[in-house]
Image: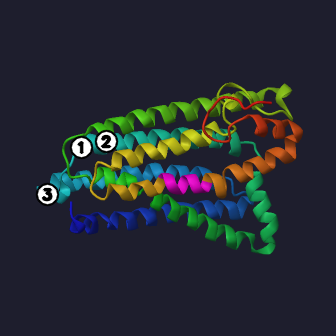
Amino acid sequence: MDLDHLTHVAPLLLWGWLLAAVVMLAVWLVELARRDATLVDVAWTLNLGFLAVLYAVVTGVEAHASTAEVASGSNARRVAVAVLVSAWSLRLASHLVVDRVIGKPEDGRYRTLRQSWGANAHRNFLVFFQAQALLDVVLSLPFLLIVANPSRDVGAIEWLAVAVWSIAFVGESVADRQLARFKRDPASKGRTCRVGLWNYSRHPNYFFEWLHWVAYALAASAAPFGALAWSAPAIMLFLLFKVTGIPATEAHAVASRGQDYVDYQRTTSAFVPWFKKGT
């Protein structure tokens, strides 16, 4: 694949952005009516599933319509991307709906933003939601690179990527279930979850979420320009450590659980599941 091929598939990113932007506009209208921005997390997740399916279908149609190299590649690879990303997207979105949306008040992160923005909250949320749509498109680049790969052979690194994806999917699912079960127990109120994976990492869900993006970057590495796909796990790592992930979550945890969480921070790995530190 040369630069002409990249120019050929790049318009799909524009169509992807338009799709994501429309979805986020609809979510903003819901925020406007309900004064609750939590649904943006669900929409952000579902958009990535939509984009993976869009890219797979369009490149697949082109493959059947043309014999040129630009429209070749593997249908099995396209189906795998659509299925795997959709499975991740639907699982996480359903978890977020149950955990944060149905019968729940607005997520604390967005309540804080609403209070700090004051009268400009609705306008700022519109900008924020559209920034999330743009982030969806940037993070979807590995999907596009994978499905646009002109090779008909699925290589060893792509099979490795499937194995990494499987570990990430199971790990994140288990971590989410363990935390949800802990939170449902009335005796857990005011306490820190140290059950299962949470005994070895303060944020095992975040770790496996990041590992999931590593899987896509690995798979895209087999494609021309595949190095660009490593921007996705790099961006996710930055967001988790510096923006909306660990800092906000831990600040809230310290404020609500006090010394119990401080002790947890002192003895437990922040990200990668690992053995306990000395007490």
Q: Which mark is residue 75?
A: 1
Left or right placement of residue 83 versus residue 114 in this view: left
Discs 1, 3 touching: Cβ within 8 Å: no
Q: Could you tell me the amino acid type at mark 1?
A: Asn
Q: Which mark is residue 40?
A: none
| Quarter of the view holding residue 35 | bottom right
Q: Identify the secondary structure beneath mark 3.
A: loop
How crowded is the residue under tag 2: few (<14 C-alpha within 10 Å), some, or many (20+)? some
Q: Quadrant of the N terminus?
A: bottom left
Q: Which mark is residue 79?
A: 2
Going 57% across and 66% down the picture, which residue do you hit? 131
Would you name the residue on which mark 3 appears?
66
Going 64% across and 29% down the picture, which residue do you hit? 197
Q: Quadrant of the C terminus?
A: top right
Real-space CA distance between mark 1 and mark 3, rounded to the nearest whole angstrom? 14 Å
Q: Which residue of the protein is positioned furthest toward the left in this rendering?
A: 67
Real-space CA distance between mark 2 and mark 3, rounded to the nearest whole angstrom? 19 Å
Q: Could you tell me the amino acid type at mark 3?
A: Ser
User: Over which residues does the magenta segment extend?
Assistant: 233-239
Residue 212 percent coordinates (x, y):
48, 42
Residue 81 percent coordinates (x, y):
36, 44
Asked if residue 234 is among those painted magenta in the image, a careful observer would answer yes
Q: Toward the viewer: 244 or 98?
A: 244
Going 35% across and 45% down the picture, which residue do you hit? 219
Up the image or down, 7 lies above or below 86; here it is: below
| Quarter of the view holding residue 278 | top right
Asked if residue 94 is among those painted magenta in the image, a careful observer would answer no
Real-space CA distance between mark 1 and mark 2, rounded to the nearest whole angstrom? 6 Å
Q: Toward the viewer: 130 or 210?
A: 210
Residue 129 percent coordinates (x, y):
60, 64
